[in-house]
Each structure stands twice: as structure tokens, then as C-alpha cells.
Amino acid sequence: MRYALTFVMVASLGLAACAGVLGLGRTSPSHPFEHRAHVDKGVSCVACHAGISTESAAGPLHLPKAADCVRCHQEPHDRRDCAGCHGEAHVRGGAEIARRHLRFEHGPHTRAVKGDCVRCHVGAGERDPAAIRPAMATCFTCHEHQDEWRTRDCDACHVDLAAEDTPPASHLVHDGDFVREHGVRAASARDLCASCHSERSCAACHAAGLAPALPSHLRFDEVRLSGLHRAGFRSRHADEARADPGVCTTCHGESTCIECHQRTRVAPGAGARSPHPPGFVSTARGGGAHGVEARIDPAACAGCHGGAGEQLCVGCHRVGGPGGNPHGRTFSSTKDKLRDLPCRLCHGGGP
Amino acid sequence: MATRIHGLRVALLAAAAALTAVLRADAQSLRLRADAIAETRSPAPAGLVVLQGEDKVRPWLGVEGLVWAGAHSGSDADVLTLHVRLREPHGLGELRAGRFVLATGAVRPVSLDGVSALARARWGSTVEVFGGTPAAPRLGDRSYDVLAGGRVAQSIASRGAIGVSYVERRSRAEIADEELGADLALAPVRWLDVAARSAYDVTSPGIADALVSAAARSGPLRVELFASHRSPGRLLPATSLFSVLGDFPSETIGSTVRWVAAPRLDVLASGAGQMVGGEVGGNGWIRADLRLDDRGDGSLGAEARRQHVSTARWTGLRLIGAHPLGHGLRFTSEIEIVIPDEPRGRGWVWPWGLAALAWRSASGWEAAGAIEAASTPEHRYEVNALARLSRSLGIP
């Protein structure tokens, strides 16, 4: 019983110590502004955010200053600027970003909702709001924007989505393991992706066959980047490729393997080491492991033995050759075996 | 080869002319980023230049270029993207010409020197056609000569879209590949996303590639189920000798769970069963990310991974840390330890580590330096120093 009590106390102390780190407790003096308390006291929003009901798109932000606070709070408890603790810097920063990147006027909206600001700023009515700035979904509750959504015409509200660099909060959320997911989602909605992402987002990885410009290579200091090529990928690359056959061809061309293997002298040639284990090709029945490996990931073989290197296979596997029939049981083709490539290499007697 | 070089020159001149037109307009939106990277492992420094221009006066015109330049073992320079984008102001149409990454419907990402045109109707129909030659590194050999195809799609009550596509690759006038594709994206309710894609190989009839995923969100939890089918032999051009070995697909089915355990603590876990070459295996990983401040400038992360399929069997552990030092400075470090089940002369453990110091100024300058050390299957130990200098410019 005594041990259990000690354990509970130590665990509680540990949790309390961790609470700040985990974000459960506050470590900075600032906190969300007490909008709810002001709403409960019947203070009108425009009493502090004066002028917002007539604001134009290019107007000031109408964030209250200390002078506005002391009109009511005539004896403040502290001489410091009210905004240092009441309200969070990132919320004010968010308002500035919104002003820069959104075409929005508070004036007509305030009139449309008859001064009921909480209708959009739902967070203002909550005791511990996560955000004051409305999510885009809130806009969609009144503005259908069906045509704009279908035609990806975001310019009516967003000045420049690519430059905004703000991940969406309420739609198309990029959470989970998005690197793994993005391909299947982009297949059906590339034009939707393009409404925020410029071409270089794709080219940074998918043009890897042209140049070694991967984000993990260039931004080596961004350790939170996820993706296949992080950290000691060079050590793992052979095993990664074997674990997911064909995945390398998503970005890499056939010559990628041979170029690097020649540079690092892990390729056929004088003084080079073979990447294949002993007995990979054998004259015994079954021919060694190379047949099985080739069927599992033929793209890996083509990486070094493609093009003219295919003659290496033809030498044994041509019709009547000692290597026998290389076609698996599931093989089928609509090609003419005497005329079309690659069939004629073995069936037609040559290239 | 001469024709290809001439073709590229024409494309470069066209893009440069369009870019000049953009630059000459007043009040342009122009973004420029240049990175120079040097590492002791490479023979000479390399660089990446990104130039993106959009004209506010003519919002229908945009130009984007991404150029790699450096002495990287024969790769002196190459253009990753360089294209002109014309866009109907209300999004009803778009035309891209130059070098760009094409990925839509059944087409897996391909760098293309060509043209892509897209038209959208207000009732949600989309028609896209594309064609060109695949971009080859340094104007070298291509695995096929020409790619052409298209996609037709229809949105479903703003809740999703369904599309069908066709793509054909030709090599020396012969069909190297012919694929039919179908894709689907649905968000029937706010908490559920479903997406699927499939490509059917017409030349060697069978499914070349298929993916499906469904993700559901509820509060701090997000659960995703996914499955994939890939036939590696069908991903090669049908003119390759390695495409005739038969259909030995690799299949995966699994789930990824994300849990926001605390405001600053995210936990991600994934597990999947795999079938590779008739052998059953699997993989799994769990990762925890702890942000040390509200903005996430400082963070700690840990990841454990297990891969167990075919001859790829290893266990890995990765730790990351980032700590802001003030005045725009940030220290980051990363450690990875991989233990293969069967060393086969490659060493019984492959440790890798990196320590980096980065600096970022408000004016757009960035600099970073790092020391990387590893013991790899090829080298008992290896130390590499890296440095990067970057400059971003944005003219609103």
C-alpha cells in the first residue's frame, strides 16, 4: 500500500512536471483573450473593435490597444501592456496573415449578421477557444461557392494561395501519414492540389531522375521532414527497394541505379564488387536466385541490365537456349512475338 | 541528339521570353529562391534555383522554373521544371507548356517535355489532354519516346470526383505501354475521406497498380485503412525484356493511426501486412513527436520501425531533436540505428547521425552547416560535412 502511494505521488509529480512540456499547462503568461467574459458582461464587440463595422478590405486590423482597455478597466492591475498577457501573439499574427492574404471586408458581413459577430467567430463564445479566426467551413455555411469550388477559382477570396503557405484547417487536411497518402489523393484531384501547390512541390521529389534535388538532401537541417529518403537511407536503400518492389520507379528512371553503382564501383567492371550474392546465377536447375529476384522486382534488374544489357538475359533465355522459358505462368501479351520488341529478341532471332 | 538539344533550346527560349514578359509588367508577383549546397562527399558544390513569376496585371499568365546546377559526377546542370502556365481567370481552363511533372489519373508521376491542357465546366466536368516526350537526364536516352493521353472526370455533388483516364507510351513508333485508369475521391461526410486509383495494363492485360485508402477522424484520433496492389513488371515499358516475366504483384494492406495525445504530443503508428513474391511479411512503425513550444520551433521525436518481408528484414530506431538558440539560430540533430537481421557481410549495425546548426534571417537569407557520420554496408565509417546557403526573394 505504501509503495503504491509512493508510486502514485511520483507519477503525479512526473505528470505535473510534464504538463507544461505537453502543452497541458501554460508555460507563458499569455493566454487566449477573455472574449467569453466580455460577451457575458454584455460588452459589444464594436466597443473594443471600434470601426470594424465600416471597415474596408484595406483598412486597419482594429485590434484594441491598452488605451481602449483602460476606458473600462480604469485601474489596471499591472503597468505592462495588456496585450502581453491578455491574448496570444500568434492569434494577432494570424489576423495579420489573414489581412494580407484574404479579400475580406468586415463591414458588409457585420451588417449581414446584424452585429452578431459570434455567428462567425464561434470561438469568442467559448470559455477556452482554440481559435478566434473562423475556419473556411464557416464561410461555406452562408457562401455556397459551388461554382468556384468546381472550377478551383479560389482567387475571389484568396489573394495568392501558394504564397499564403497556410495549411487548410477544415478541408483537405494533410494529417496522418500524408506522404504515403498523397499519391492516391493527387490522382483524382491534381487540379485541387495545384490550387495551393506550385509545380516545384511535385518536382522536388518526382523529378529526382533528373537531378539529386530531394528536400531531404537540400534541407538536411529540417529533421522533422518525413519521407523515404531520410537519415541513413543510403545504407537501407537495397532493403527498402526489396520490401516494396517497383516503388523506386515512381520517381527514378531506369538509369538511376547503374549511374550511382558505377560511381561507387558497385557494378560490373574492372575492380568493382558485384551487388549480387554468390550463386546468384547458376547452371544448376533453377538457375540460382536470380530468376526469383527478377520476378519479384524486374525494375531493379532493368536498373542495371536494361537496354543493351538485356543481351545478357537473351544469351541464356532465347528460344532453345540453356536458360529455358523465362515467362511466368501468369504471363500474357497482345504483342506479335516475331515482330514486336522485346519478343523478337528471343523469338525472332535478334533486335 | 541534336534535335533534342534544339528542342530544349526552343523550350528554354520560349520560357525565357514569357518570363521576361512577366518581369516587365509592373506590380508583379515574383518569387525567387536560390540554394547552394556543398558537401565533402561530392566533388564540387551544387545549387538549386527556383524562379516563379505571376503577373498581377495579367493573372492568367504564370511561369515557373526549377533548375539544378552543379558538378555532380557528370551532371553539370539540369532543368527540373520550366514551363509557362496560362489560366482562364475563373478557373475554366488551364494550359501548361514546357517541362513539368505530370501526374493524373492512371499516369504515375512523369517529368514531361510537352503540353497539358485542362478544361472545366461549371457543372463539374473536367477534360484533360496531355502529350510530350519524357524528360531524360542530360538529354540522354529515354525508355520510350512519346507519351499521350487524357482524363475525363466528373465531380459528385461537391462531395467527390470520379475519373477515367487513358495513357499511351510509344517507343520507335511501337506501343511501349498502354494503360486505362480509374480514380475516385470522396468525402461523403465531414469526418470521412476515401480515395482510390487503379491502372489497367492493356498491353499485358492485368492490373498494373491499384491503391485505395479511407480515413476517418474523430477528435484527437484519425484512423486510416489502406491497401495497394502493384505489379512491378507492368510498370516497366512493355518494350523492356524485364516486362515478360509474368505477373508477380506485391500487395499491402494496413492501417495508420494518428492520436493527438496532448496539445503538443502527436503519436503516429502504422502497421501493414505484405505479400511480396508469394511470401507473406509485414512492416510497422510508431512515431512520437513532442513540440517543446506552441510554435513547434523546438521539438523531440522518436521512431521505431520494423520491416519483415522477403529478404528485407531489419529493425530501426530514429531520434530527432530541434532546439532554437535565439537570434534566428537553431540546432538540430538526428540519429538512426538500423540492425539488419542478416548482415551478409554488410556489418551488423548501420548507425547514422547528423548534427546541424541553421540560421534564418527575416530578410530571406538562410545558412546551415552539418556534420554527418555513419557506418554503412560499404564503409566501416564515413564522415561528411555539409553546408547550405539560401536566399529567398519575394516581390509582392
Image (cartoon, coloured by chain):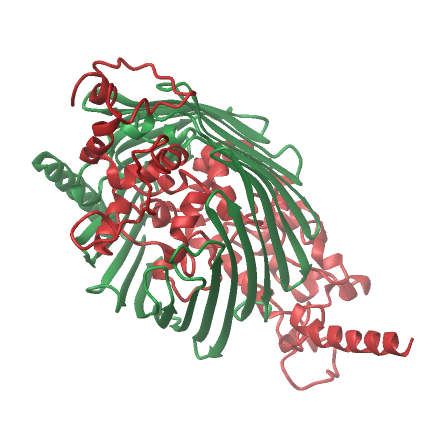
Closer to the camera, B54 or B146? B146
Residue A216 x, y percent position in the rendering = 39, 58
Q: Quadrant of the N terminus of chain A?
A: bottom right
Residue B188 x, y percent position in the rendering = 64, 32
Give the left or right position of residue A226, taking residue A28 as reference.
left
Quarter of the view holding residue A39 = bottom right
Residue B298 x, y percent position in the rendering = 53, 71
Height in image: B169 above or below A209? above
Closer to the camera, B255 or B109? B255
Q: Which tint was used for chain A?
A: red
Give the left or right position of residue A126, taking residue A151 as reference.
right
Residue under the point 17% across and 49% down: A269
Closer to the camera, A164 or B168? B168
Height in image: B60 above or below B124? below
Residue under the point 16% across and 52% down: A270
Chain coloured green in this rendering: B
State the residue lying farthest toward the front.
A284
State the residue lying farthest toward the bottom.
A79
Quarter of the view holding residue A155 = top left
Quarter of the view holding residue A342 = top left
